[in-house]
Image: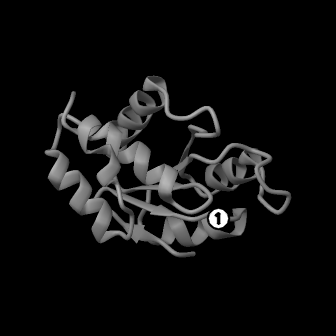
Amino acid sequence: MDVKRINGHVSVSPQINPEDVAAIKAQGFVAIINNRPDGESPDQPTSAAVEQAAHDAGLAYHYIPLGREGVSPDMVEKTREVLEGSNGPVFAYCRSGTRSTTLWALSQSGTASAEEIISAAANAGYDMSHLAGHLSQK
């Protein structure tokens, strides 16, 4: 797993497998967000398989798929709710980590400056500068 820490509350990663969940739990995460729609790649595990592994490990699991249709306000709000409602670090993943970082960044709009959000994402290896106009809004 290639875990990238955005801040003390959220980290992102490329695609995980059900057998990675034990290591995620061991790193202190309390919740997993899956931002990858099922069926994007034949070698990707289903959301249900990762969800079962998460529940077996005692982790909360949230499926907020971001596909070709793009970001919706509902996805951003669900991400915000998960992050605000979790009593510990949250682990989010998609194919590369970019969609997870995008949803995190948009969910933080209004709680931090665009510069702070873009900087945190950049420190984790993700360029969110294209979202600057959106991040300046609540």
Choose between 77 and 28: the one closer to the eye.
77
Percent x, y for residue 45?
Answer: 77, 57
Query: What kind of colouring is applied to the model shown?
Result: one colour
Residue at the image position 64 percent from the left and 69 percent from the top: 20
Q: Residue furthest right?
A: 42
Q: For this view, does 103 lie left or right of residue 111?
A: right
Label 1 amino acid?
Answer: Ile
SS at mark 1 in the image? loop
Percent x, y for residue 112?
Answer: 15, 44
Is residue 31 visible from the viewing direction of this image? no
Neighbor class of circle 1 (other Cα within 10 Å; few <14, some 14-19, many 20+) is: some
* Rendered position, 22 above or below 35: below
Percent x, y for residue 55?
Answer: 63, 49
Quadrant location, the N terminus: bottom right
Quadrant location, the C terminus: top left
Q: For this view, does 13 lie left or right of residue 124?
A: right
Percent x, y for residue 11?
Answer: 40, 61
Is residue 54 visible from the viewing direction of this image? yes
Residue at the image position 50 percent from the left and 33 percent from the top: 71
Label tally: 1
Residue at the image position 55 percent from the left and 35 percent from the top: 70
Residue placed under numbered mark 1 in the picture: 16
Q: For this view, does 57 lie left or right of residue 6?
A: right
Choose between 131 and 117: the one closer to the eye.
131
* Rendered position, 129 above or below 107: below
Occupied quadrant, residue 73? top left
Choose between 2 and 68: the one closer to the eye.
68
